[in-house]
Image: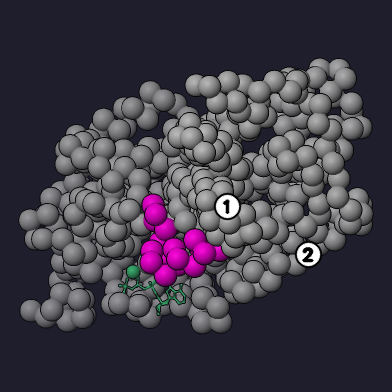
Amino acid sequence: MLLEIKDLHVKYGNVEVLHGINLEVGEGEIVTILGANGAGKSTTLLAISGLVKASQGEILFEGRPLHKLPAHQVVKARISQSPEGRRVFGTLTVQENINLGAYTITDKEQIARTRKWIYELFPRLDERKHQLAGTLSGGEQQMLAIGRALMSDPKILLLDEPSLGLAPLLVKAIFQTIQEINASGVTVVLVEQNAKAALRLAHRGYVLEVGNIILSGQADDLLTNPEVLDAYLGGS
Amino acid sequence: MGLWSLMEQFFQQLTNGLAVGGIYALIALGYTMVYGVLKLINFAHGDLFTIGAYLGLTLLTSLALNDYVGGFLGLFILAVMVMGLVGIIGILLERTAYRPLRQSPRLSAVVSALGASIFFQNAIMLIYGAKFYVYPQDLLPVVPINIFGLSIPLMRIIILLASVVMMIALYLFVQKTKIGTAIRAAAIDQGAARLMGIDVNFVIMIVFFIGPALGGAAGLMVGVYYGQINFTMGWIYGLKAFTAAILGGIGNIPGAMVGGLLLGVIEALGAAYISIAWKDAIAFFVLILILIVRPTGLLGERVAEKI
Ligand SMILES: Nc1ncnc2c1ncn2[C@@H]1O[C@H](COP(=O)(O)OP(=O)(O)OP(=O)(O)O)[C@@H](O)[C@H]1O
Ligand SMILES: [Mg+2]
């Protein structure tokens, strides 16, 4: 397994919000994490990235303990994240945002190559590279957040609600791009409210409920699972 | 008075204001850069400026730099040494007074900053005593420079040039280099910066070197320009530079530069044409005015960030 989360507990202050979750991600997979608001999906991704610390349990990446690394070294270990709410650097230009994504990369040629690929993936960003990121539309900011995360040449890309607030057509385009990114060899962990679309895209899925994983399995099976249907796919 | 002498007085005050403003700007940059990454007013910054002035004097007299290299080169070497030392003190200040409180409520860090300020001021007083010190006045040949028939002291020109060069260098560093961009990113969103692989602690360390180094340089400049230093000088200069930082928009680097220069000019012209007695009050009048009329400062919040 590329990534293994074992008995992960996370607390904010005294409140425990993840109560010992287990999760695995294999190389080349798209794994989706579903769950209601406040279930702990973002917290799980933040724990992988090292922005919040595990109070118990471990996170192994290629067998090595990831939970002991500070956040900036997780990126160096080649796990990057497009966080919830995009969090682009609004007063920096699009290009500066993109370049910051490659902060851990020293090979100039590699940076230029990846940047070219990202501008091909998102031509909109290429057109607007000298614009301040804060003046982009929501959808464009989402593209920027994903593109920026790809600049570090990740083995695993963590995506937290990339479709949030986007028009249906754009959601489709973003999901298609995620597929392309995965096809290029990047393993993807996808957190989504849009459960149906996520399960169609993903190989496997986990369902999180108030800090516990209550279901997991092949995406196809989850799509037809009555429990999931009721809770996340609006019945039928 | 003839028109020429009126003009001459105006330009003398203007160049003097710009020189003093350059000094304010250098100090203001320290406030604004630290505020940028920590959202904290480093109240001990004015005292780091004082330390720069005292270290400059001690190095000048103990190394007898002037005897060996003299003139411009001597001043340059002196400035580099002072900036390096004060920068290191800045790093130590962050490690001891601020880093342990990074996760604590804001007020704890503010109190720690005030404590550090009191500590530095008393340390200087205990080491040097509470008297005024006088800088050697023969650092440079006393040749007034003539510009368009205007006779301007050489030291004033050097101070102005040096501060402008440092500001341009800082601007290029922050805008064009990888670390500089990381500093700007960390000021916007520390969490997101860490997700880029930026070691935010390292960024904060760099900021706590550069800010105090510039403040230390400003202390040295006051020493060589006015010739007299005192252990409380950091208080008034700190307050004025803080005003300059607010004037330009706290957290905004070009803002601190513009704010400093502007405040220096306003103050010099105000002192000349309104009343010298009002010189110090003018800065605070400006501070209050800006807080009422435009709390974001002149260059603050140029871009509304979309969430
Ligand atoms: N910084 C924080 N401090 C305190 N509590 C937090 C913090 N961040 C999240 N929480 C709490 O932790 C729980 C899980 O939050 P999390 O953001 O992981 O949920 P989520 O599944 O991503 O929800 P959503 O779908 O709304 O994004 C929630 O109850 C939330 O209120
Ligand atoms: Mg979330």
Disc 2 and disc 1 on one polypeptide chain: yes
Please state which amino acid type lies under the numbered disc 1.
Ala
Magenta highlight range: B284-300
**View extreme (front): residue:** B1
Q: Residues within 10 Å of mark 2 (few under 14, many from 20)?
A: some
Q: Position of residue B109 (x, y in %)?
A: 65, 68
Can you tell me which quadrant of the image ligand 2 is in?
bottom left
Q: Toward the viewer: A162 or A130?
A: A130
B206 above or below A215?
A: above
The answer to whether residue A157 is seen in the rendering is no
Q: Are marks 2 and 1 in contact (CB under 8 Å)?
A: no
Q: Position of residue B54 (x, y in %)?
A: 82, 44
Q: Disc 2 or 1, which lies upstream in sequence?
A: 2
In the displayed structure, does residue A129 sit left or right of residue B94?
A: left
Q: Quadrant of residue B236?
A: bottom right
Which residue is under mark 2?
Answer: B118
Q: Per the image, is B22 magenta?
A: no
Q: Quadrant of residue A155?
A: top left
B159 above or below B101?
A: above
Q: Which mark is residue B271?
A: 1
Please state which amino acid type lies under the numbered disc 2.
Ile
Report the residue at 39% width, 52% height from top: B299
Q: Which mark is residue A148?
A: none
Q: In the structure shown, which secondary structural element does the residue marked by tag 1 occupy?
A: helix
Report the residue at 35% width, 76% height from top: A39
